[in-house]
Amino acid sequence: MIRLAISADGHINEPGDLWNENLPASLVKDGPRVEVHDGKIAMVVEGRVIRRLAPAPPGMPEGSISSLGKWSENDSASRLEALARDGVSGEVLYPTVTFFTAYSIENRELQRAVCEVYNDWIADTFADPHFAPVAVLPSAQPATCAKELERLAPKGICAGLLPAHSDDLPFNRPEWEPLWETAADLGISLSFHAGTGRHQAPIRGEGGAVANYVITCSGPIETASVLCASGILERHPKLRVVLVECGSGWLAWALDAMDDAYREHQMFVKPKLAELPSAYFRRQGGVTFQRDRVGILNRIHTGDRCLMWGSDYPHPEGTYPKSREILEEEFKDVPQDSTDDLTWRNAARLYGLATPEGFAVG
């Protein structure tokens, strides 16, 4: 039975004029915006089209537009109403425009400023115990990421977002150590959202839509392996990491594969760890999923602590507006304690989200 639902993955649609109004004047022209560009709604930054979303409605003129459509609840009360329609009591909030544009910015001053503007807006707008706003970190600048967490901690930010991949500066590089240390010390978890840091559509032509979705969702396997095997989680036992919107069905296999590689290739392995790699993820890692019967049934191999449901509202692959109905089907033969862990308790515990009377986090 689904007694309570808290979404560990939701997306806010930022106001289209957020950066025009808040960036320094010298940076405004290159800041993120949503535009009708060649007949399509597109996300633009530094004058470059980063992502085309959909054909523009007939008659919509070229140029900037103010929102991404009908889902634009840019205040906590409207957002809570939307969640209530879906039977959800709280939500971890990720961005949309910032999500797609921030990691593509080449000007480091602009990247830092874009993240700061968004982070201040989301922290101030959703300062409600039912929401956990996630800060976007300027990933080209690891030391600046750490300083941004320090700046935001007094605002109650409890999570920071990084791309799932950082090919120019891999996460096992020493430059990232200040961020791991700062996040662990502040008790702020770090999220790595699928679909960021690399091109989402490497396959063109027939089969591309399906293949690219699978590639995107499976990409965080690499991230999880690096965090565990490089010693990052061992060195920082208080650090919590979450791989977002990638499903959970792969996790049981990945943990087993990491351990197998560690045992069978000892002559190549460095650093030597005190425990097998999987132990660190089971203790400090998490993944979010929407519909994932395979992952739910494989929880015996991963542990309940690693898994968190998220609706992905308002994205089309999410479970809104039938989240409770879908969850009842997905968890139809799962013990109540495990159901509670995966559908609300793990998220409430990690992010400090409010729960109704009688729903103790423990």
Image (tube, helix red, strand yellow):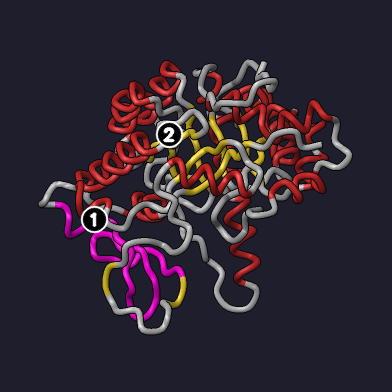
Image quadrant where residue 255 sits: top right
Residue 268 visible: yes
Label 2: which residue?
160
Question: Residue 325 location, x and y as percent?
Answer: 76, 50
Disc assigned to residue 186: none
Question: Residue 205 location, x and y as percent?
Answer: 58, 78
Residue nearest the observer in this picture, 349 or 100: 349
> Please, what is the three-letter code of the amino acid marked with disc 1?
Gly
Tell me what residue is drawn at x 29 percent, y 53 percent: 105
Q: Which residues are magenta?
A: 27-53
- Membership of 32 in magenta stretch: yes
Lateral position of residue 183 relative to residue 299, left or right: left
> Please, what is the three-letter code of the amino acid marked with disc 2?
Gly
Residue nearest the observer in this picture, 102 or 355: 355
Label 1: which residue?
31
Measure the C-alpha gap from mark 1 to mark 2.
21 Å
Of labels 1 and 2, earlier in sequence is 1
Image: 178 above or below 245:
above
Tell me what residue is drawn at x 33 percent, y 54 percent: 15
Tell me what residue is drawn at x 45 percent, y 77 percent: 55
State the residue lying farthest toward the left: 26
Query: Mark 1 near mark 2, Cβ–Cβ under 8 Å?
Result: no
Residue nearest the observer in this picture, 87 or 206: 87
Residue nearest the observer in this picture, 278 or 329: 329
SS class of the residue under badge 2? strand
Question: Residue 140 location, x and y as percent?
Answer: 32, 42
Lateral position of residue 67 relative to residue 287, left or right: left
